[in-house]
Image: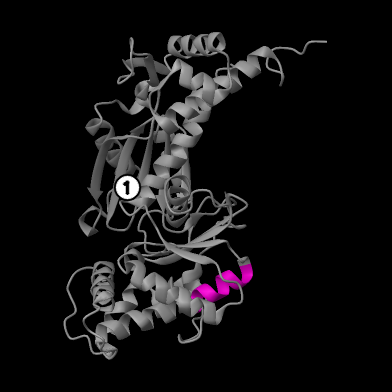
Amino acid sequence: MAGTAGTPGTPRVLRAMNDRAALDLLLEHGPLSRTRIGKLTGLSKPTASQLLARLEAAGLVLAGGTTEGRPGPGAQLYEVNPAAAYAAGLDVTPDRILAAVADVTGRTVGRHELPTPGRRAAIPVVQQVTDALDGAVKAAGLARDDVRRLVIGTPGAFDPGTGRLRYASHLPGWHSPTLLGELAAALPMPVEYENDVNLAAVAEQRLGAARGHEDFVLLWNQEGLGAALVLGGRLHRGWTGGAGEVGFLPVPGAPLARKVSRTGSGGFQELAGSQALAGLARELGVTSVPSGSYYEVAAALVARAARAADDTDDDNDNDPHRRLLRTYATRLATGLASLVSVLDPELVVLSGTSLTAGGEALRALVQDELEELAASRPRLVVGDVTEHPVLRGALESALATTRDEVFDTSR
């Protein structure tokens, strides 16, 4: 007996599955001809034609140019309609909120940065969020109601039981128990919240060095030191959202920190976090330490040390910059050894400016040290998504759900 509409296996559901497959192919490959779509999906030419007509009528695809370079008339090309939907992401730090809007193809169409230093500290968080979002929406030439979903990335994590932000005492104004309700009331679209390092891992999994990997760790070192854990292809957040808060990890070489929830820091953070690099550099004899925020200074020192390590004309292993890079690598591997011993990941991605600035030179040193300290030996790579990875991950997360909603033609 035939099933009712919407039941798996019915014509409507099968059509929807074919529609989604075609849309995903267009997102991956760009403009495609009807013949090419048919070959990639395994559909007959008449069925592919009906599919494209259906998607065009629904406003999901556009007929664009034609193929060139072949004898005879060019074939019509089809592409996903960028204006079919928009999603937004926010990357929140103590110093600023970075907002962006992307169309359904993933292209960023508007961006806005809202500084939030001391003079703006009294401005309510809800207003900061709406101001940042509105700035990006305006830059995109859109209205706030055009955005279907927003993902906000912050340090720490919102406890699913209490709704309060944990593990981020340094983010002023974000700890009110009523904040999530106030934001939901102020914004016309669904809002999701995610840890910033988790979003960097989303960006690497979708677009960067972790593509195709189901089990990996992303180690982040920038304003703070943290990790994202992807197990079986999915983010592992933990019971309170605190999985990956490795800055609190007790490690050899750092004093045992107690009451870490009050101090906001722990052993691994003190040993290898960005704020430790300037002092370490001075201890090792680096005489010229640049100025700037601690994480800008850390990235500059690591980049300079990596250049010294790459200088094949200088074999002086007593160079203070080289000593800095080796010592930093050992400190990083000390904490990583605990992670990989417990999780046994396939891959470790190094991300955040205090790690990516070291490039291959730092990666190789950490890999060597880790192989001495841990029984499991995952491959280490430097992250590919280096331009605002948290924001990119927020957009990718928002777009994934938005596409599921918009591309569902079975309804």
Q: Quadrant of residue 137?
A: top left
Q: Position of residue 200 (x, y in %)?
A: 42, 53
Q: Is residue 323 above or below residue 220?
A: below
Q: Is residue 269 visible?
A: no
Instruction: Identify which residue, 92 or 23, lies in the foreground.
Output: 23
The residue pinned by badge 1 equals 124
Q: Residue at x 42, y 14 (%)?
A: 59
Q: Position of residue 204 (x, y in %)?
A: 44, 51
Q: Residue at x 28, y 26 (%)?
A: 142
Instruction: Give yes or no for residue 115 being in the magenta stretch.
Output: no
Q: Quadrant of residue 287?
A: bottom left
Give the residues drawn in magenta, as a range.
334-342
Q: Residue at x 20, y 56 (%)?
A: 119
- The answer to whether 294 appears left or right of 225 in the picture is left
- The answer to whether 104 appears left or right of 300 in the picture is right
Instruction: Identify which residue, 65 or 256, lies in the foreground.
Output: 65
Q: Residue at x 55, y 52 (%)?
A: 213
Instruction: From the image, give the main secondary structure of the stretch colored magenta.
Output: helix
Q: Quadrant of the N terminus?
A: top right
Taking the view exactly as shown, the residue that stands out farthest to the right is: 1
Q: Is residue 372 visible?
A: yes
The kind of residue on which mark 1 rests is Pro
Query: For numbered disc 1, what is the local secondary structure?
Result: loop
Q: Residues within 10 Å of mark 1 (few under 14, many from 20)?
A: few
Q: Position of residue 70 (x, y in %)?
A: 33, 18
Q: Position of residue 265 (x, y in %)?
A: 43, 73
- The answer to whether 16 appears left or right of 89 in the picture is right
User: In this figure, what is the number of numbered marks?
Assistant: 1
